[in-house]
Amino acid sequence: MKHEAVQTYYGETLQGSGDLQTNACCTAGAVPDHLKAILAKLHDEVLSRYYGCGLIAPEALEGMRILDLGCGAGRDVYALSAMVGESGRVVGVDMTPAQLEVARRHQDFHAEAFGHAGSNVEFHEGFIEKLDALDLEPGSFDVIVSNCVLNLATDKAAVLRGAQRLLRPGGEMYFSDVYADRRIPAALAEDEVLYGECLSGALYWNDFLTMARAAGFGDPRRVEHRPLTIENPALEARVAPIRFLSATYRLFNLPGLEPACEDYGQAVIYKGTVPGAPHALRLDDHHVIETGRVFPVCGNTWRMLAETRLAPHFDFIGDFSTHYGIFAGCGGDSPFDDLVAGSGAASSGGCC
């Protein structure tokens, strides 16, 4: 699918989220109270042009430098600008001039809404597959986010490689996207409506995991996932029997993460100090770490906490001096296997 077709769909065909023909690009899930308060301050035009499929607001963002890939009209950029505060910065990249024009038009409005003496955001026009063509310093971002945009990219592996290059050591890519339970047939991938609706450009979930590891992101972690019901009988019939889900993943830029969850007898204790998470911190869909509790973890999880911005919020027990084999209960099943048909519910994961 050509860039021009996507630019036309999001810059001209769609004038707001109400113009979407399916629910794939606008099912963000439950919004926590602290984020609701931030979203309530965003300009109406920015909110009306939101096409995301998840919540890309990880924890502990104060003072962070964040890059939003495929920022559109800036909804997530401005929400994140409130979370990083005046000492942080959020940079948005998008290839659609009409979307960026909306984002830039309301820059002063949001600087005033969030009490920033000067705006802490900036926007760049460009392709997320060609991040090296932009004036962005390698290793300069703490967090990279993206919301239902990777599926629209013509070279998804290039996006992941570019993101890894721009992240500092210990940084992470935290993003939501649409995935399929099998590879999309070529004929469907050429359908401009299905592509623009975030369906026929979706990666097969297992191909994504392989691609992420090849880009330097060992041990991808799924934060949450839920089925997409499409809710358009005509388009649903065209993609059947393929199933789709929306999932949020976090990819840590930590060289040397092991391919499996290995047990070194380690544990962590969460201090309860992350804003908005006084009782527990959710690292992913199988690590919800209660405050004050000694929580056994594998070596990879230990590093994801000890070598990232999350380190000040934990006490750490153990080291890598003794290896005890594979961490009990580690698994790698399809995210489609644990979806309860028709309910949108998912079980917790089975790894460490």
Image (cartoon, grey):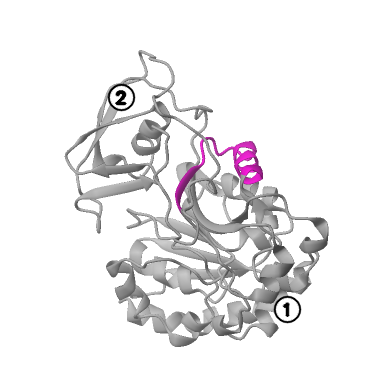
Q: Residues within 10 Å of mark 2 (few under 14, many from 20)?
A: many
Q: Vertically, is 320 above or below 116?
A: above
Observer able to see residue 76: yes
Please state if 37 lies on the left or on the right of 272 as rendered.
right
Please state if 207 lies on the left or on the right of 24 as rendered.
right
Q: Give the x, y percent position of residue 198.
A: 64, 66
Residue 96, quarter of picture:
bottom right
Q: Vertically, is 131 above or below 209?
A: below
What residue sits right under mark 2 in the picture? 266
Q: Using the numbered discs, state the Cα–Cα distance from disc 1 to disc 2 in whole angstroms.
A: 52 Å
Q: Vertically, is 103 above or below 209?
A: below
First in sequence, mark 1 or 2: give its number. 1
Q: Residues within 10 Å of mark 1 (few under 14, many from 20)?
A: some
Q: Inspect the magenta stretch and tell me whether residue 213 lies in it.
A: yes
Mark 1 element type: helix
Q: Which mark is residue 47?
A: none
Identified by mark 1, the residue type is: Thr
Q: Which mark is residue 8?
A: 1
Q: Give the x, y percent position of residue 225.
A: 48, 54
- In this picture, which residue range is highlighted in magenta? 206-224
334 and 138: which is toward the camera: 334
Identified by mark 2, the residue type is: Gln
Mark 2 element type: strand
Quarter holding the N terminus is bottom right
126 and 33: which is toward the camera: 33
Residue at 42% in and 56% down = 345
Q: Give the x, y percent position of residue 75.
A: 47, 74
